Amino acid sequence: MLDFRIYTFLKLCDTRNYTRTAELLNITQPAVSQHIRYLENYYRTKLFYYNEKRHLELTPQGLRLLNYATSASANAKKIQEILAMPSYAAPTLTVGSLPSMGAEVLPMAIAEHLQDYDVNISLRYGDSPQLLHMLSSGEIDVAIVDNSLPMTDFISKILFHDKTICVCSRNHPLAESEVFLEDLYSQRLLLGYRDSDYNHNLDALLKKNNFDLSHFRHYLELGHATAIKNQLSCMESITFMYGIIFHRELQNGTLKQIYVKDLPSHHAIYFCYLKNSIFYKDYDLFYESFRRYLERQVFS
């Protein structure tokens, strides 16, 4: 259990507004100020300052305290959950993942881990910003994210490198051919649900290379990777996703790749957790199980 003033500090870091912090914590604004002054006196350093636009900012020492306090808060929440469980119950590892990884890759990595360790696993899904916020708040223990965000507050380890590839049915007229992106504009594009990580990643990749989703004449939003795979098999269409999602279908020939010459798309997928977590050994064991699965089943 942390000192209540640390929770005030964390909330103020989130809102950057004394009045809003008081409202959320159901205390008075002078009480918020008093909590922050206490911490500044205790740690003998200034934690906040106002910039030239009168926006509340953290000092360098405030940033350091935020890093430690975030981890301490997550540790405290995890300990509380463990102590509330019966002594005979297995511990729970809560994993946050991009939907694209969670639907196709993560289940096999979990199966690999459960062969060796007695643990319960709970899954949560979101895009990278959502997952990192969930990590910071202690809602999840580890996260599987892409490389689109800075990882300064987290321990991050590369799970694997991948590419966004264009995939179609084995009977598609462009299967296994080399094309330019504009050659695909007349094709029906299969997408994930609106605001999914599939769509965000593809949109960012296209814009980075001066293209746009609007250039495709037809599209179909299907929700998740399994539905997209099934649709690819029964109609002439294409999709763009991480190659690992299709590794089995590409190996057995049920789906084929279209090689897009003017769309470079290398990515790193990261496994991350909060710095200073006292449970890091448990998280590293899951990372090692994940890597073993990838090396044996995907990249062998």
Image: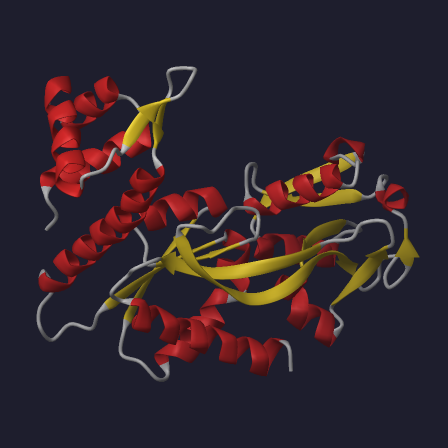
Q: Tell me if I can see residue 156 in this picture.
A: yes
183 and 30: which is toward the camera: 30
Furthest residue in direction top, as rendered: 53
Tell me the residue at 73%/69% (across/down).
Answer: 254
Quadrant housing residue 221: top right
Quadrant housing residue 3: top left
Q: Position of residue 300 (x, y in %)?
A: 64, 82
Q: Where is residue 34 in the image (x, y as percent from the top left)?
A: 11, 26
Tell whether 42 sits left or right of 196. Answer: left
Furthest residue in direction front, as rendered: 44
Q: Position of residue 54 (x, y in %)?
A: 37, 15
Work out whether 18 lies above or below 234: above
Tell me the residue at 32%/54% (across/down).
Answer: 140
Tell me the residue at 42%/43% (across/down).
Answer: 130
148 and 54: which is toward the camera: 54
Work out whether 165 lies above or below 86: above
Work out whether 26 lies above or below 40: above
Work out whether 164 lies above or below 287: above
Q: Which colour scheme is used?
A: secondary structure
Quadrant housing residue 59: top left
Q: Tell me if I can see residue 137 in this picture.
A: no
Tell me the residue at 18%/39% (across/down).
Answer: 44
Number of numbered discs:
0
Q: Where is residue 232 in the image (x, y as percent from the top left)?
A: 72, 55
Tell whether 109 sits left or right of 229. Answer: left
Tell whether 142 sits left or right of 266. Answer: left
